[in-house]
Image: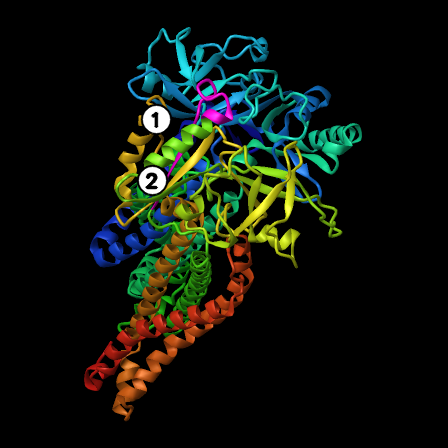
Amino acid sequence: MRRLPIGDWRLPLKNWPSAARKSAIGNRQSEMGRIMQDLRYALRMMASNRAFTAVAVVVLALGIGANSVIFSVVNAVLLRSLPFPNPDGLVMVFESNLQRRSLDAIAAANFVDWREQNQSFENIAAYREESFNLTGGDRPERVSGVVTTAALFPVLGVQPILGRVFQPGEENLGSSRVAVISQGLWERRFGADKNIIGQKLSTNGEPFTIVGVMPAQFRFPEGADLWVPPRQIVPEHVLNPTVNMAANRDSHYLSAIARLKPGVTLGQASADMDAVARRMEDQNPNENMGRGVRLATLREYEVGDVRWALLVLLGAVGFVLLIACANVANLLLARAATRQKEMAIRTALGANRLRLVRQLLTESMVLALIGGALGLLLALWGIGPLVSLIPTSIYGAQNIGIDGMVLGFTLAVSLVTGVAFGLVPAWQASKGDLNESLKEGGRGGSAGARRNRVRGLLVVSEIALSLVLLVGAGLMIKSFVRLGQVNPGFDSRDVLTMRLSLPAAQYPDGRRRAVFFQQVIQRLQSLPGAQSAGAVSRLPLTPGNSGRGLTIERWQDDGSGNSPSADYRVISPDYFRSMGIPLSKGRDFTDRDTVDAARVGIVNEAMARRYWPDEDPLGKRLRIDDDDDPWMEIVGVVADVKHFGLDSQSRTELYVPCSIDPWPFMTIVVRGGSGSAGLANAMRNEVWAVDKDLPVPDIKTMEQLLSDSVARRRFNMLLLGIFGGVALVLAAVGIYGVMSYSVTQRTHEIGIRMALGARQSDVLKLVVGQGMALALVGVGIGLAAAFALTRVLTSLLFAVGATDPATFVIISILLAGVALAACLAPARRAMKVDPMTALRYE
């Protein structure tokens, strides 16, 4: 029960004397009455000044709405809890190459040792992402899935909505093949059949028994629709599906996730795994020398490097809101000058300064809340286009929307904004001289000078903030232009791509795989409009990579201590021609380069420079470390290709003929003419003519893949550019408003000057000079701030320095030019002042 002090006693409210209770209740009712009175008066004032209200609300809506939109992205990607119990205990586990300081996939035998020797994890699971071919329905379908140990589901702590998850014995050799499917696959392919448990699913040519259906929110890894256990202990290698990899330390292809024991921190777990890695290095020096273990929280792994970009965008949109606040504060200061007499009368009638400030702040808060409501509507409208710009690779992008967190953020921003732009004008308006304000025609010169100083300070702040945003946007634009000028090493025009994955049951050996791809490529080459067709194991700008250790004949160690290695690509004849990859020297592969002929290979220019810097690589020989076959002769050198992005460094690459090492999955590329997009359906039909049960996923153009590879940089550039443009407009409006008000305020002075002989050019210089002085001060402060703050963009830029002089100079000139244009309109009006009219101006 609430207790209130009465002298030295504390008594329940019900025991108060009746008069005291009535007084307290009356005070509360009186206070509520004053608040409602302030609100009604604020609404009347807004209704009577519609132009002012409209401008202020629109400016605030732009600032608050932009913040709400970006916060909705931050909320979905960075703040929203992961859909697992106790997600803070989930960690991703990687192998690390201590020499290269890189994170690598995991060798199966190393995972087995981690599982047995660690002291920090409740459980740890290994998995490998894979695409599965589903057959047996109206049309074959390709779905994303996972081969995983049984511990995955206990580690994540998620239960199925139907059936069960894997049991430990189901990952042993000879166990019946079972599968768990997603709710989306269950609904899409099986019509949400309640009797799905126990039904058969034909996957990659093998029958699987469905034992469970996972809930809709469970999509680990992102996009997975199907989970199957390994054939033998740990997930099998995609190229060797029947081989037990539990003792293999050479092939690094697994991912791992673990759950920390209660009370164990990430640092303690890292120290424990470092000790395990050192023991493994001592026990297996040939395979594990220089290899360690690295841990990362699941949130850190999912978000990756997008965290910093989103925080930068959130800071940028915060600058937009500050500029909007400065604009509205300037409007309120101008309006306060017309309300001096009103404030004086209120003071004369007994209102104290705090009461006046509260009334004016109430008006500001009402403006901010209305602006926030309109901003929320703008956010609802803007989220759709924004989501279409966000790269699909960003975790959580599909969950972006307006939820309770975003609504709460918008309300909080609106309230804080109302105080931020309303407090200074309210304090200034309540500070006027009572006697001076009540005089008929009193000008309030000292108060006007104070307001002008505050208004000038606000304009300087707007200019400075705008320049910081514009410099950031300019750096991002220049960076993106530089990225677009990078030669990817291939010609992306008129190239169509489709990735095919052959099931092991139908294509158990290399000979059958080689025949399939040869038949498909021959059929595609004969299509009307197709100029050439080829195949590659790893297409540029797509996920995944394969590397091989090499033995190079008569190669001398360069002192780095690194053994020769190269990224490994399997290609068909005509692949280089189809992709437009130039052949620097030597020859391409032909149909005569088969498994029965002499082994040949082609290297890229980076590999030629690395291992034969002063020699001709043609005719040189090398051998793959884990390959017992004869030496391979280099017969060609091709241009470097940006496999991992336009901003990546070229790496050493070795190409071998598809007929020698046919992979079960390959990407087909077809170069057509100007109407190559129409080949897509014909390409599907040609594949189905060879194998009617093989799914053909979406066919993409190489230009689309190239565009997707720079999607994150384009997203950052567009948003910063939009924010910079909005800031520029708001700054121009702010300068125009201040100068327009100044001209109105100084009409009498201007009339006197002109009556005494001042020319129109003198008036022009007076007005423009005043405005440009404010603008140049703002530019100077903004340059200093930009020089310090743009350094946070370093990781987001490409081939452009964070303090690029050209960008700073161009943006400064642009902003000064806009400020000059904003000053000219009020100056022209001042030049047209009639001296006689001005001398009578009150």
Circle 1: element type: helix
CA neighbours of label 1 inside 10 A, class few (<14), some (14 to 19), many (20+)? some
How many angstroms separate mark 2 from mark 1 (CA)? 14 Å
Q: Nearer the viewer, residue 88 or 460?
A: 88
Q: Nearer the viewer, residue 50 or 498?
A: 498
Q: Amino acid at mark 1?
A: Val
Residue 77 in magenta stretch: no
Residue 83 sits above or below residue 792 on the image = above
Question: Is residue 352 in sight in this rendering?
Answer: no
Circle 2: element type: helix
Q: In this figure, which colouring scheme has been used for the structure?
A: rainbow
Question: Is residue 390 in sight in this rendering?
Answer: yes
Residue 510 in magenta stretch: yes
Residue visible at 40% across and 13% down? 201
Residue linked to disc 1: 690
Picture quadrant where residue 764 is located? bottom left
Residue 87 sits above or below residue 778 on the image = above
Q: Give whichever of discs 2 and 1 has the lower sequence position.
A: 2
Residue 768 sits above or below residue 80 on the image = below
Residue 460 locus on image (x, y percent): 43, 68
* Range of magenta residues: 495-512
Residue 400 locus on image (x, y percent): 39, 36
Q: Residue at the right extreme? A: 282
Residue 753 locus on image (x, y percent): 30, 88
Q: Are marks 2 and 1 in contact (CB under 8 Å)?
A: no
> In the rendered image, which quarter contains the C terminus?
bottom left
Q: Nearer the viewer, residue 435 or 282?
A: 282
